[in-house]
Image (cartoon, grey):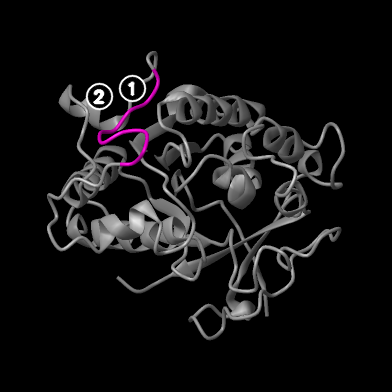
Amino acid sequence: MEREFSVSSIEHLLMIVPHQDDEILMGAGLIYELLQQQKKVTVVLATNGDYGCSDYTKGRTRLKESLNSLKVLGLPPEQVIFLGYADTGMSREESFLTALYHAVDPDQVYASGASAVTYGLGEKPEFHFENCREHGFYTRNTFLWDLKRLLVQECPDCVLTTHSLDMHGDHEALFYFVREALKKVEKTVRPRLLVGMVHSPEGDERWPLRGTPVFTCPEGIEEGGLKWEERLVLPLRESLRGGLRDGNLKYEALKKHETALEPNAVDYLMAFIKDEELFWEIREP
């Protein structure tokens, strides 16, 4: 039986997502609900979403789109953190974070077409630069260091990220990285760990179901360890309900992600505009 998700016990949510727009698709309603209850929310963008670009232009455009999108929900730029890593493709074979996670040499640099070091915006540098006064090389050790430092620095009581069942390689690998980082800092910070789903095993063409106000169970999640009956359902406030209409704050926030809203992706992305959001709690270490 589904459980309604009560956010009353959360004081500081640290949402760590792979790409720009994932924060809206997975948790715009959760962000808004917590802000309405005067709780603290920090959104962390692991990559710059610069897939297919040979310089910083696409990445910086997408970072600005996330800032503008989150402003719609009431989250100021000060509560958004850029880790500044690369985006090189969706499949596990192309995924930047998958390559980083499975690196045999943790100090090997994995350069993308855009960069070999972390970057953010001129007026808002990435996390590594803000902490070390230098850009971080794209290595496993650097990424893990950033995550550990982030967790200790923010000290959240709840962390939300993507699950390992998510079919985007970056989404899967980010879950493993976050879990590893949490294990390494558990003597200092032990937050509740929640996960969501963006690219389900059923495929983007079939899930989320288009034109419905609620989510259906994605095929294949049970085999991967997520039980549908254990999902946490967050009913969204009226200002985020009612589908694709002007004035729906989740819809308005998603529209700020102009780069992601390519013609072949619009139906899929807009299918996340529902009257609820779904999460699961991960209780293993």
What is the magenta range?
112-121
Amino acid beneath label 2: Glu
The residue singled out by tag 1 in the image is: 125
**Residue 33 in sight in this render:** yes
198 in relation to 266, above or below? below
Tag 2 secondary structure: helix
- Contact, mark 1 vs mark 2 (Cβ under 8 Å): yes
Residue 119 belongs to magenta span: yes
Q: Residues within 10 Å of mark 1 (few under 14, many from 20)?
A: some
Q: Position of residue 27 (x, y in %)?
A: 59, 49
Mark 1 vs mark 2: which is more N-terminal? 1
In the drawing, does residue 146 fall left or right of residue 19? left
Q: Position of residue 3 (x, y in %)?
A: 64, 70
Label ID, residue 130: 2
Write the residue at 37% across / 33% down.
Answer: 114
Which one is nearer the viewer's eye here, 125 or 168? 168
The answer to which quarter of the image holds residue 197 is bottom right
248 in relation to 98, above or below? above
**Residue 190 in sight in this render:** no
The answer to which quarter of the image holds residue 192 is bottom left
Residue 243 belongs to magenta span: no
Write the residue at 44% across / 61% down.
Answer: 169
- Distance from the alpha carbon under mark 1 to that under mark 2: 6 Å
Amino acid beneath label 1: Pro
Q: Residues within 10 Å of mark 2 (few under 14, many from 20)?
A: few
What's the magenta bit mostly, secondary-structure-wise?
Answer: loop
Label ID, residue 266: none
Tag 1 secondary structure: loop
